[in-house]
Amino acid sequence: MNVIRFSDLCAKGQAAGQRVFIRADLNVPQADDGSITEDTRIRASVPCIQMALDAGAAVMVTSHLGRPTEGEFKPEDSLAPVAKRLGELLGRDVPLVANWVGGVDVQPGQVVLLENCRVNQGEKKNDEALSRQMAALCDIYVNDAFGTAHRAEGTTHGIARFAPIASAGPLLAAEIDAIGKALANPKRPLAAIVAGSKVSTKLTILKSLSQNVDQLIVGGGIANTFMLAAGLKIGKSLAEPDLVGEATAVIEAMKARGAEVPIPTDVVVAKTFAADAVATVKKATDVADDDMILDIGPETAAKLAAQLKQAGTIVWNGPVGVFEFAAFENGTKVIAEAIAESSAFSIAGGGDTLAAIAKYGIEAQVGYISTGGGAFLEILEGKTLPAFEILAQRAAR
């Protein structure tokens, strides 16, 4: 995908003295007292902001935080805690500016944080009048918020239509590159791991990937539905029997291409869903009526790990078992370690997936860790994200 990259503009000196508007993703979790409990997104936004400052730009940064009501600002909606943390990371004061749509006072070499953009009337609906007002604030617009790239809103799409220059920040550009490497022009074999509790929430992803991947590994409740489609009994395990036909269609679509959906040959079961439940390894053909499947078995995990180590590209979304419980984490752990050991280019995304990556300490071995949950899933569905689309259109002008 061809977009204007902010890094290129800075390298050419085109950002010097210019007013730069950065849409970042600073939507961080907070405690009841408003303190930030996890600052990964703020730290991830720093390179783009520092790049703009180093280039001599007058820098404006904004983000949404939480789910405010448009036109009704409340103290809990404020980006004040974010401004404080951002200032600490940048080593400078970061003033917070409210009511900024009509104009912002910022000079080259300075940075200001513009208050919660979703408080502005018309932000969510991508209002044209608001978008034009925001575009008038800047010479260069930079989208560096992949986590919101699937939403067509004022600060993610509308402003990009009307700003003199619309570009992708380093974080967004890295996502574009990684996604292109994994899905648009992958090194084969291409393996995808799609796991979760329900087929229904990932059905479009499964259908889309079944047209492209060489191996589609399913896990969690999704795998249970596929086991039903393969004629296996799953006891009282979480599944969606009404979607067996859809699962069968995915299996057949893969088979028609000479690809496969590996069905577990052994599983780890328990009588109850609990951290202290007794775990029993069984052949997939021996699941009892009162069993709950909570993980893939060691034989299945070993087979999948061997296949992943031979892959050219791996896309990972979702743990394959209840990895939060020690007795049912082996499948996810084995797969995580196989991805880490594989020479394949790997891209991973989704909250539970990131938690598994952190738990097993393989961050450095994963080729690219996506910062967006919903946006990453929509990419896997084969959708074109609004933020990507408008930046590509602007680059083509």
Image: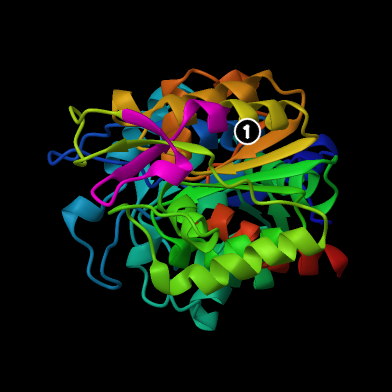
Write the residue at 35% across / 40% down.
294
> Residue 358 falls in which quadrant of the image?
top left
The C terminus, quarter of image: bottom right
Q: Which residue is mark 1?
A: 304
**Extent of the magenta region:** 280-301
Question: How far across and how far down the image is residue 136, in percent?
Answer: 60, 68
The answer to whether residue 334 is left or right of residue 239 is right
Question: How far across and how far down the image is residue 225, in percent?
Answer: 46, 59
Name the kind of residue labelled 1 in the image: Leu
Above or below, 152 relative to 67: below
- Closest to the observer, 211 or 106: 211
Write the residue at 70% across / 65% down.
252
The answer to whether residue 313 is left or right of residue 96 is right
Question: How far across and how far down the image is residue 276, in percent?
Answer: 18, 27
Question: How far across and how far down the image is residue 30, in percent?
Answer: 24, 40
Is residue 183 at least partly visible in the picture? yes
How many residues crowd mark 1 within 10 Å: few (<14), some (14–19), many (20+)?
Answer: some
The answer to whether residue 73 is left or right of residue 192 is left
Above or below, 335 relative to 62: above
> Residue 8 falls in which quadrant of the image?
top right
- Closest to the observer, 43 or 301: 301
